[in-house]
Image: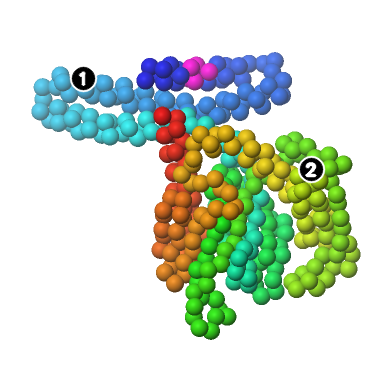
């Protein structure tokens, strides 16, 4: 406990030191940006430290008052306040511990969301379309901006592949646990016998990478252009506007044909490629940490089945945390998705806390 208190005191002193330095003059723009970020990162931690200290001081004062009070009514009031403070203290301590947890540097980034139909034919494509709409509605409800980067439809209302850039506050932090295999169980409209079919779609959530994050050499790229095609393969453009970019060192391929402009398609394809390369680097960085701490919410690997949407029972089950909600319509409309996201974040924080305290 003494070492923790010493660490907290260091953080408070550093926060005050940064405030004084930033109030002075003679800093370059880069120094101001760097120190301002450190100061703002410490702000919520110091607020929690001060709140905990005030509560401990109040507790000590009330203990003393309760011990010395002779008036019965005053003593009863002191005992009641004592109970309230003792209940509040563990909550504040827990909040402080959470604020001290290592932050995911990518949490504040925008995200590129990719949804692909998996096993199950047209039914899988219809489910992929349902998922893509769910995330678009969820983005709207949270006040985020959603920009479709690419949409490959089947012509029957399904989606073979869809990609969107989601922009806003803490987008990646809230969407990153959505990566994985999503399974659906329902009776397809085309199923005459009423049998329940199981199909799947994969979701990938990538932190948006900027040019400064990933350097791509032109010599490492093969860029092919061709005519964009629509559902069923019919041509929807008479010019070679679609772009296929192959990253030769990794073999990653990105196809972009949503725009009528070849230049715009190339720009979007490079954005997606950059984010995929950044995600590869991110996964490599996290490999050692993941080996030390197997997260309760799983690895986020796209091969891992994470959630089942069972229409006959009206339920959605997240298998990583054994959470079941009997409100499938509200989940798919985006309204109840926060209940799952919040539970996943809480489970991840609990696992991090357990690792730190071990």
Residue 94, quarter of picture: top left
**Residue at figure coordinates x 61%, y 28% from the top left:** 37
Left or right of 207: which side holds 317? left
Q: Observer-nearest residue: 247 or 109? A: 247
**Which residue has dot 1 on it?**
64
First along the sequence among labels 2 and 1? 1
| 2 and 1 marks in contact (CB < 8 Å) | no
Give the number of the mark in front: 2 or 1: 2
Q: Quadrant of the C terminus?
A: top left
Q: Residues within 10 Å of mark 1 (few under 14, many from 20)?
A: few
Residue 177 makes an appearance in the image: yes
Q: Observer-nearest residue: 85 or 236? A: 236
Q: Is residue 201 magenta?
A: no
Outermost bottom residue = 192
**Residue at figure coordinates x 52%, y 31% from the top left:** 102
**Residue at figure coordinates x 41%, y 29% from the top left:** 357
Q: Quadrant of the N terminus?
A: top left
Q: Decide whether the magenta segment is chiefly helix, strand or loop.
A: helix
Residue 182, quarter of picture: bottom right
Q: Secondary structure at mark 2?
A: loop
Give x and y (percent) for residue 287.
59, 37
Outermost front residue = 291
Residue 139 makes an appearance in the image: no
**Which residue has dot 2 on it?**
249
Give x and y (percent) for residue 298.
51, 46
The total of numbered circles placed on residues is 2
Q: Which residues are magenta?
A: 10-14
């Amino acid at each position: 406990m003494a070492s923790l208190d010493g660490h907290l005191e260091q953080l408070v002193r550093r926060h005050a030191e940064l405030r004084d330095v930033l109030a002075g003059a003679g800093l370059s723009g880069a120094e101001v940006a760097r120190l301002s970020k450190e100061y703002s990162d410490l702000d919520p931690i110091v607020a929690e430290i001060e709140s905990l200290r005030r509560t401990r001081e109040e507790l000590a004062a009330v203990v003393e008052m309760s011990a010395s009070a002779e008036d019965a009514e005053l003593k009863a009031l002191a005992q009641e306040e004592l109970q309230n403070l003792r209940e509040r203290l563990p909550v504040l301590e827990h909040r402080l511990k959470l604020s001290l947890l290592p932050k995911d540097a990518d949490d504040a980034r925008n995200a590129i969301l990719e949804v692909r139909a998996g096993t199950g034919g047209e039914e899988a494509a219809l489910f992929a379309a349902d998922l893509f709409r769910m995330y678009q509605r969820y983005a709207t409800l949270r006040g985020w901006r959603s920009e479709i980067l690419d949409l490959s439809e089947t012509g029957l209302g399904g989606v073979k592949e869809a990609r969107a850039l989601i922009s806003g506050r803490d987008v990646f932090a809230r969407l990153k646990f959505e990566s994985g295999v999503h399974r659906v169980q329902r009776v397809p409209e085309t199923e005459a016998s009423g049998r329940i079919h199981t199909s799947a779609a994969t979701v990938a959530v990538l932190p948006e990478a900027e040019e400064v994050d990933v350097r791509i050499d032109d010599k490492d790229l093969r860029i092919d252009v061709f005519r964009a095609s629509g559902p069923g393969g019919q041509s929807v453009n008479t010019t070679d506007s679609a772009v296929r970019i192959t990253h030769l060192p990794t073999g990653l391929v990105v196809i972009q044909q949503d725009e009528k402009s070849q230049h715009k398609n190339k720009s979007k394809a490079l954005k997606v490629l950059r984010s995929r390369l950044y995600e590869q680097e991110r996964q490599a960085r996290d490999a050692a940490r993941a080996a030390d701490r197997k997260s309760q919410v799983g690895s986020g690997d796209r091969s891992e089945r994470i959630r089942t949407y069972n229409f006959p029972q009206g339920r959605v089950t997240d298998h990583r945390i054994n959470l079941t909600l009997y409100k499938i319509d509200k989940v798919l409309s985006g309204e109840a998705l926060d209940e799952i996201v919040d539970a996943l974040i809480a489970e991840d924080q609990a696992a991090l806390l357990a690792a730190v305290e071990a």
